[in-house]
Image (spheres, coloured by chain):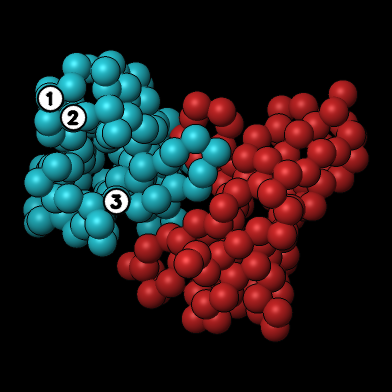
Amino acid sequence: GAVVSQHPSRVICKSGTSVKIECRSLDFQATTMFWYRQFPKKSLMLMATSNEGSKATYEQGVEKDKFLINHASLTLSTLTVTSAHPEDSSFYICSARSPGTQYFGPGTRLLVL
Amino acid sequence: GESVGLHLPTLSVQEGDNSIINCAYSNSASDYFIWYKQESGKGPQFIIDIRSNMDKRQGQRVTVLLNKTVKHLSLQIAATQPGDSAVYFCAERDGGSQGNLIFGKGTKLSVKP
């Protein structure tokens, strides 16, 4: 199947700093990518839909100024958690839509101290 | 609330037995369904999908059944192996090919040796 990568896989940062997570589709072009957040033992929660060349579409309750999304190319989307706080600690997973289906990245574990 | 749910939150099976994981969905307009497997600390991995114009699809050791009459989806795993231990999510897509995925809550499958 198609491959989606994320970097970094784990990050620990101090409260108040910003963290950037990259999502890449390695063997296909994705005009649409998605960012999810997952709490322990819970299902995936869609945060936003990232469209190449246009603004991201955020789900209700997700602060767009807090979670900045940039989809600069057909293979790269970035999520920046600005001024991170301990409550932002979570597992962030990106996904890329390929024709007919959707593939997920391995996730990024964020811990804010 | 979520439109996709699972009948059993946990499932424990003996190695070598067959496993059946169930999922109910409520949106009769959903046209596409996917099963994902998520191992601890990793992103969801595509297992198998099925379109609404089909009622059965088989893969390697896995079969997905779709019953549109009762809006029920199931994943059957033949000869379950310890490596199958994971959380399994069903997802439905609404809105056609550009629709978003809606995830169920997940079923944890534990395989006893």
Residue at 43% x, 72% y is B94
Q: Which residue is mark 2?
A: A84
Amino acid type of disc 3? Met
Q: Tell me residue A63's x, y (percent).
A: 17, 50
Q: Which mark is residue A96?
A: none
Spot occupied by residue B105 in the image (x, y as percentages of width and height): 57, 52
Which chain shows up in red? B
Residue drawn at (59%, 70%), measured in percent from left and top?
A: B25
* Disc sitting over residue A47 in the figure: 3
Label pair 2/1, CB-CB below 8 angstroms? yes
Q: Can residue A20 be seen at all in this image of the molecule?
A: no
Q: Chain of mark 2?
A: A
Q: Earlier in the sequence, mark 3 or mark 2?
A: 3
Q: Measure the C-alpha gap from mark 3 to mark 2.
A: 16 Å
Residue B95 is situated, as x and y percent measured from the top left of the image, at 38, 75
On residue A16, the disc is 1
The chain that hosts pointer 1 is: A
What is the CA distance from the residue labelled 2 to the residue labelled 1? 5 Å
Chain ID, cyan in image: A
- Residue A92 vs A35, above or below: the answer is above
Q: Nearer the viewer, mark 3 or mark 2?
A: 2
Q: Name the residue at 76% across, 34% down.
A: B110
* Circle 1: residue type: Gly
Mark 1: few, some, or many residues within 10 Å (few <14, many ≥20)? some
